[in-house]
Amino acid sequence: MYDVIVVGGGPAGMTAALYAQRNGKSSLVIEKAGFGGQITHSPKVENFPGMLSLSGNELADKMLEQILAQGAEIEISAVTEIRDLGDKKLVLTEDGGSFEGKTVIIASGVRHRMLGLPGEEDLVGEGISFCAVCDGDFYAGKTVCVAGGGNSALQEAVLLSEKCRKVIMLQDLDFFTGEGKLQEVLFSRPNVEKHTGVRITGLVTEGGAFKGVNISTKEGDSLVACDGLFVAIGLIPENDPFRTLADLNSWGYFDSDERCLTKTPGVFVAGDCRSKGVRQVTTAVADGATAALAACRYINGV
C-alpha cells in the first residue's frame, strides 16, 4: 500500500509526489498519457521562477527526473474509479490495474477546448497557443488572431495587444459575451480589430509554418493572414469519474479552496482541476505542495 497515490502527472501531480517523498511517504503517480500536462504545449517557458528559459517538455522532464530520484513510482494508465474504503483508497485503472493508498491526490488537470479542425493538434506550440502569458512574447510585433469572445478570450487579447502589432478577434457568435468593462478596455485599443459571426473553417500553413486561418461569414469565405492563433474557447475539466468523492461546481471543477480539501477524508485535489482564479504552472505546483502536506498531516493523524 502506498501512502499517497497521485492521479495525474502534470506539474501539480509531480510536485505532490515530490513533497510526499520529501516527507518520508511513499508515492505513486498515475498518468494516462505523457508527464507534464498542459505545460508540454509551450515551446518556451520564461515565467517559472529560477528558470531563465526552457521548453515545457524540458521542464516536465526535469520534474519527472526529480521525483524518480526521490523514490516516487509511476504508472502509465487512465484512472477510471477511486473507491473510498475508509482508512484506505482503492484506485482502479482502465487496463485492469488496482492500487491501494492511504490517501489520494487528484490532479487530473484540464484540456483546452479545441476548434476541431484538421491539423490543429500538430500546430499546437507551432502557431497555435492557448496562453498569452506563456507565449505572447513570441509574437511581439506580429499579427495574431484570438478565437473566442468570453472573458478568457478578452483577457488574453488585452495582454496580446500590449505586445503585438495587431490583434484580430474572431467570435463565432453575433456578439461578445465577456464583461462590458473588458470589452471597453480592449476595443478602445487602436491595434485591436473585432469580428463577430465568424466561423474558423481551416488552418493555413506554408512549408509547415502557420500562416493564417480560413473563415466563413454571412458575406462569404476569406483568408485572415496572421502569425499565430490563440484559442480561448474554454477549458474542459476531466473530473466526472470522481464526483462522488469531491463536489464539483457548475463548471465541472472541484469545488475546493486553497487548502485542497474535499468532502472525503484522505482525498485531496490540486492544480487546474480545482476551482481557482489563476491557472498557471506556478499555481499548479503550489497546489501540489499544499495537497501533499495536507495528505501527510492526515496520515500522521495531525
Image: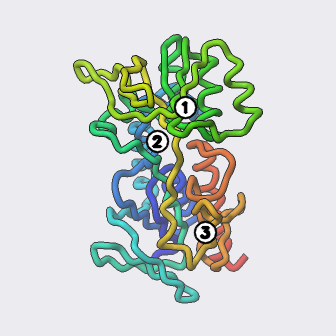
Q: Amino acid at mark 3?
A: Phe
> What x and y, as percent, mark residue 116?
35, 44
Which of marks 2 and 1 precedes in the sequence?
2
Q: Give the left or right position of residue 271, taking residue 182 as reference.
A: left
Look at the numbered disc 3 and give the secondary structure of its residue: strand
Q: Which residue is mark 1?
A: 196
Q: Residues within 10 Å of mark 2 (few under 14, many from 20)?
A: many
Identified by mark 1, the residue type is Thr
Name the spot of residue 33 as percent of width and height, x first: 34, 55
Q: Are marks 1 and 2 in contact (CB under 8 Å)?
A: no
Which label belongs to residue 268?
3
Q: Residue shown at 39%/31% (left/top)?
A: 216
| Distance in Å between CA atoms under marks 1 and 2 | 30 Å
The N terminus lies in which quarter of the figure?
bottom left
Front in this rendered view, residue 17 or 25:
17
Report which residue position mark 2 lands on.
Answer: 39
Residue 17 showing in the rendered view: no
